[in-house]
Image (cartoon, rainbow, N blue to C red):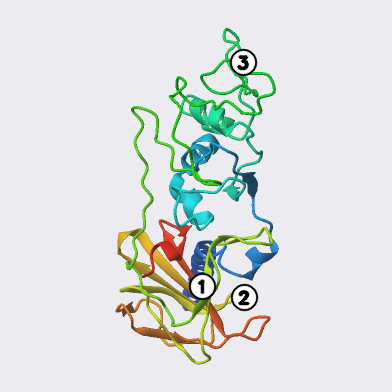
Amino acid sequence: MEGMIRTADDRQRQSGLSRYRGALSLSLVLILLLLVSCAGPQTVKTPAKGVYHIVKKGETAYSIARAYGISLQDLAEVNNLSDVSNIAEGSVIFIPAADQVIDDVMVFAGKSAQAPRDAVGKEWKPPADKPPVTVGPQPALKAPQPGSAETAEVGPAAPMPSAPPEKPRARMAEKPPAGAVKEEIKREKGRFDWPVKGTVKTRFGIQPNKTYHNWIQIVCPPGARVRAAAAGTVIFSAALKGFGETIILRHTGDYATVYTHLKKRTVKADRPVNKGEAIAVAGETDEAGETFINFEIRLKGKARNPLFYLP
């Protein structure tokens, strides 16, 4: 009888251990799914969250970013801006996470340093003891003249002297206000290698159909070798529904790279890999019948624009 009780207890412990292992495995898979949750086709079907801002005369990338309370880096990466110092009047800039378009960017940018972050995207109103700022048809630093269509510029400080004539539809970067830390765009060209030889068909960020991609789509020859973009460790290697055969590598500096829609994986989890080492084979095709892979770069879990890091 005592032996039977021990056997029953052992079976119960084994059953509990199996359930614990199953729950642990499920948790790990959920964490990995969270890591690549925005890397697959599901994102294509989901409209991007944010607003579209039309660049007006006098606005710069810096003033737009400041007014909306986002970093200049994010603004540049999301919109694939190759030169933030020169954006064209009339161009359309996507502002992620914003819920309302700001009409008076130059006014709001001057007040955003004092305004709370949750006020970004809402109408700014001047203090009750000060008259409202008016943007009217009068020329800057001149007495109003009848019939003049010139518009005065309103900035974060006192009126500035007239600037030299600007090139049509372009404007150089606005200097940050005195005392502000100048924000630089970070481009680490060559930090990662191209995972496969091919052509970028779909870029990172906002798309023409108003969807958002956390990856780039690279079209390549069938059977092309997919290589590690940098030295690291394989932390995931398996098939995921909606993503196809998937590999995730962890790198130094809190970086990770994600490779999806592979035909065949040639490395397993927990294995170290060298930069340029073959880890998979390409072969999955898109709607146009072209062989491709999707490639992501993440920093501390946040998707970054791979074109800012590739050679």
Query: Circle 1 sits on which residue?
Result: 18
Q: How far apart are marks 3 and 1 (CA)?
A: 68 Å
Earlier along the polypeptide chain: callout 3 or callout 1?
A: 1
Cα distance between the residues tagged 3 and 2: 56 Å
Quadrant in the rendering for residue 300 = bottom left
Tag 1: Cα neighbours inside 10 Å, few (<14), some, or many (≥20)? few
Q: Mark 1 and mark 3 in contact (Cβ < 8 Å)?
A: no
Q: Position of residue 263 (x, y in %)?
A: 54, 87
Viewer-side residue, 12 vs 293: 293
Residue 296 position, x and y percent, is: 47, 67
Viewer-nearest of discs 1 and 2: 2
Circle 2 packing at 10 Å, graded few (<14), some (14-19), many (20+), is few
Query: Given the image, on which type of amino acid does mark 3 rest?
Result: Pro
Q: Name which residue lies at 52% across and 33% down.
A: 117
Label total for image: 3
Q: Name the residue under label 3.
A: 132
**Residue 170 horizontal/vertical position (percent):** 51, 46
The kind of residue on which mark 2 rests is Lys
Point out residue 240 in the picture as x, y percentages from the top left corner: 57, 76
Residue at 51% x, 84% y is: 220
Question: Pointers 1 and 2 in contact (CB under 8 A)?
Answer: no
- Which of the numbered marks, if any, corresponds to residue 241? 2
Q: In this view, does 180 lie above or below 223?
A: above
Residue 190 or 11: which is nearer the viewer? 190
**Which residue is at a point 63% across and 44% down the rendered structure image?**
54
- Reading the chain from its start, which is encountered first: label 3 or label 2? 3
Q: Is mark 3 on a helix, strand or loop?
A: loop
Name the residue: 57% across, 85% down: 291
Relative depth, front residue between 258 and 79: 79
- Judging from the image, what secondary structure is the residue with disc 1 in? helix
Residue, far front: 146
Task: Name above or below for residue 86 compared with residue 202.
Answer: above
